[in-house]
Image (spheres, rainbow, N blue to C red):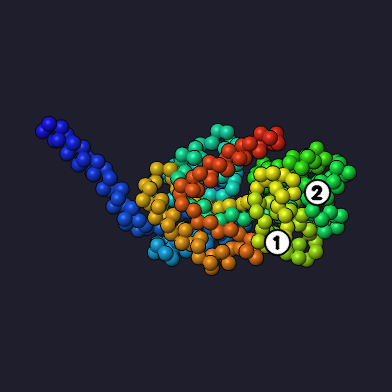
Amino acid sequence: MRIDAVKMGAACVAACALIAPVVAMAQSYPNKPVTIIHPYPPGGSTDPEARLYASRLQDNLGVPFLIDARPGGGTTIGTAIVAKAPPDGYTLLSIGSSYTIAPLAYPSLPYDPVKDIAPIALMSRRSSFIVVPASLPVKNLGEFVAYARVNSGKVNAGTSGAGGVTHLSIEWMLYGTGIKKDVTVVTYKGGGPMFIDLMAGRLQVALGSVLATLPQIKAGKLRAIASSGATRNPAMPDLPTVAEQGVPGYDYAFWMGMGAPGATPPAIINRLSAELIKVARDPSVGQKLSEEGSMEMVGSTPDVFRKYIVAEIARWKKVVADTNFKLEE
């Protein structure tokens, strides 16, 4: 018995020796600059949100939080950097909707999207609008479907980012309404040229963010025929969703959150999550980021965000299978 007690005591000492540095690191965290890898192009539509979170974290935690843009590979280049970084909380990742599409587009990813990145917090969700030129004689999704069938082969749908989440969302809408065979999808490198062609009538439908489309809707150049989210967008509360107009389960919302290398200690993850939840619940943050209240600020726990990512990957996998969509590497 004495020998067992000695062994148990030694084991406890060894365990404490392993745990103590982790606890000490978490208690002193952060004590130097933190880098947030942002896997999107600098100056893009996701930049303001990531930079605002970084600024608030810097104010609240007292050390610099620096944005490092590492675009490319459908966000997989920047994500791989974080997945392989030291799990000490000093390299973080901006996570967006493309994160859950990447495993489908790139079967041989250099990281596991569920295991190698530790979710910290889901920060925001914002749905988009399905829009048509104001000159097109349709006022809702049902009328557009009828128009596409009558004009089969003459209707073009625009999307920015071939093989990306918005491309897949347009394909899902066309498949769900039964007009996939009637409409040609045209891909653009950016939203600017796409909306020029849409307003000129060279495209008949597109999916675009509230920020990009609402000014043109108000100016009478575009007409919104559906909201892409599971619920109506606050910017146009009278506009029915795609799901309400005949495509059950349809839900596309661009979302953003933050993650860290997979082995980052839970104490650090929880510290960061608590701070990000404070940021998300600050009304001034939503006001800065949102166009007429169109953004839903979330601020989730790590566990909720993990379950959300797993569910999103499964959902998009089913959509790809149902639509026979060919994701492009």
Q: For the point 33% across and 53% down, which residue is it? A: 26
State the residue in front, 319 or 264: 319
- Mark count: 2
* Disc 1 and disc 2 in contact, CB within 8 angstroms: no
Q: Above or below — where is 229 with respect to 319? A: below
Marks 1 and 2, how far apart at CA: 18 Å
Please tell me whether mark 2 sits on a helix, a strand or a loop: helix
Percent across and percent down for residue 257 are 52, 52
| Displayed quadrant of residue 135 | bottom right
Disc 1 designates what residue? 236
Mark linked to residue 329: none
Disc 2 designates what residue? 142
- For this view, does 37 lie left or right of residue 226? left
Q: What's under tag 2, amino acid-wise?
A: Gly
Percent across and percent down for residue 17 are 23, 44
Dot placed on the residue nearer the N-terminal end, 1 or 2: 2
Please tell me whether mark 1 sits on a helix, a strand or a loop: loop
Q: For the point 69% across and 44% down, which residue is it? A: 248
Placement of the N terminus among the 4 image quadrants: top left
Q: Which residue lies furthest to the right in this view?
A: 150
- For this view, does 299 lie left or right of residue 266? right
Q: For the point 51% across and 60% down, which residue is it? A: 280
Q: Is any part of residue 23 visible from this angle? A: yes
Percent across and percent down for residue 114 are 49, 40
State the residue in front, 124 or 31: 124
**Badge 2: few (under 14), some or many (20 or more) residues near its Cα, within 10 Å?**
some
Percent across and percent down for residue 234 are 65, 61
**Badge 1: few (under 14), some or many (20 or more) residues near its Cα, within 10 Å?**
some
Q: What's under tag 1, amino acid-wise?
A: Met
Q: For the point 39% across and 46% down, which residue is it? A: 264
Placement of the C terminus among the 4 image quadrants: top right
